[in-house]
Amino acid sequence: MIVLPNQMSLVLSDDGATGTHRRISQPNDLPMQKNDPGVTGLRNLHNTCYMNAVLQCLSCTTPLVEYFFSWQFETFIAREKKELANAFAKLMADMWFGKYQYVSPEDFLSAICNVHPPFGKHSQQDAQELLIYTLNALHEDLTNNAKKSPSDTNGSHSMRMHTSESLITHLIQGVLRQNTACLACGHTSHKDDVFTVLSLPIASKKESSVQECLENFFEQVTLTTTNKIFCPLCKIKQDASVKTQIWKLPKILILHLKRFEYKGQLKRKLKTNVDFPMKNLDLKPFLSTLCVKHQKYRLYAVVNHYGELDYGHYTAFCKNPGTKEWNAFDDISSVQITESAVKTSSAYILFYTNQAFSFPKKTNSSIPY
């Protein structure tokens, strides 16, 4: 990794609707030695703040990075030449065990550009899209018999996988069940879809909450007029109701707030202040009571977006799994923040877990797929 001096500033807070934000300047020459494990900045490689913010959140996901520090992974990568998985593992090792205060993620950028070339065009990209392509590519790299399939970045179906399993499916993949009922005869059917990132619609207003976004996403829908469905019992198209529930909960729950709205030629960013819980995220109203045990989730990382739709800046707030302190990351810069500073109107992607995290370590344990 290449370490280069650069003057940066760190976003600490924003004023909500205007999109401007207060910054604290950092010195030109940052010290080379870092203090806390895992608190490592990332060099901006021409508009790659969207990538850096996502990588910081993945870096503090202990069960994910710990696999890449395991003897199991070293054995696997020696046998399977997987460029992106190898680049990700090396970057995580530099961020956790390296001695520098910030490093350059150029090897990872090169690898992810081979997966999706637009990431290499030196233009601002969507952090949620980068996250989905990264998870999908890691899944494919870590699954010997996985068939490559294009990433779907719309709605909840953010990564479609085949029957093969990997570390990604084990940790991050959940299942939604869509139940459809004919309103004429009562015939019911269901369809299952996997998800890794749940994309939630948000209302265009001043204040909202994650709970309200979840309620809107899982709201029962009636299909009528031109949206009727064909009923196999009635043998004709009929009005129907559609209800979606969570059939399987992931260990790592990622929620994407759909702030970027597209309606024909109209494009805009929704600046609604969405309140979100730091702990005890309540998913019980949205679970299939037949097979899903209610589990409590706590927040451990946030990707923030400042500015407008066509221009802006990404940062990350991450809870260090070892020190339990929150840190704000703005490319090469980092600063410790209070828990109360984590909630802002710029939150874009929320990372939750139902597990206790600690400092990642090198192990010889295997992941039970």
Image (cartoon, helix red, strand yellow):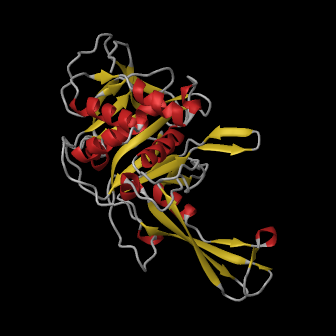
Give the answer, above or below, for where 65 lies relative to 285.
above
Residue 74 picture location, percent across and down: 27, 41
**Is 94 placed left or right of 12 in the picture?**
left
Seen from the viewer's position, the closer of residues 256 and 144 is 144
* Left or right for 40, reference 37: right
Residue positioned 41% across, 58% down in the render: 165
> Residue drawn at (21%, 43%), measured in percent from left and top?
360
Quadrant housing residue 333: top left
Taking the image as shown, residue 99 lies to the left or right of residue 299, namely left
Asked if 109 appears above or below 341 in the picture, the reply is: above
Q: Residue at x 27, y 57 (%)?
A: 355
| Quadrant in the picture for the C terminus | bottom left
Res 314 seen here: no
Asked whether the viewer can see residue 130, the reply is: yes
Query: Which quadrant is the N terminus positioned in?
Result: top left
Q: Please name the residue shown 73% across and 81% down the image.
A: 231
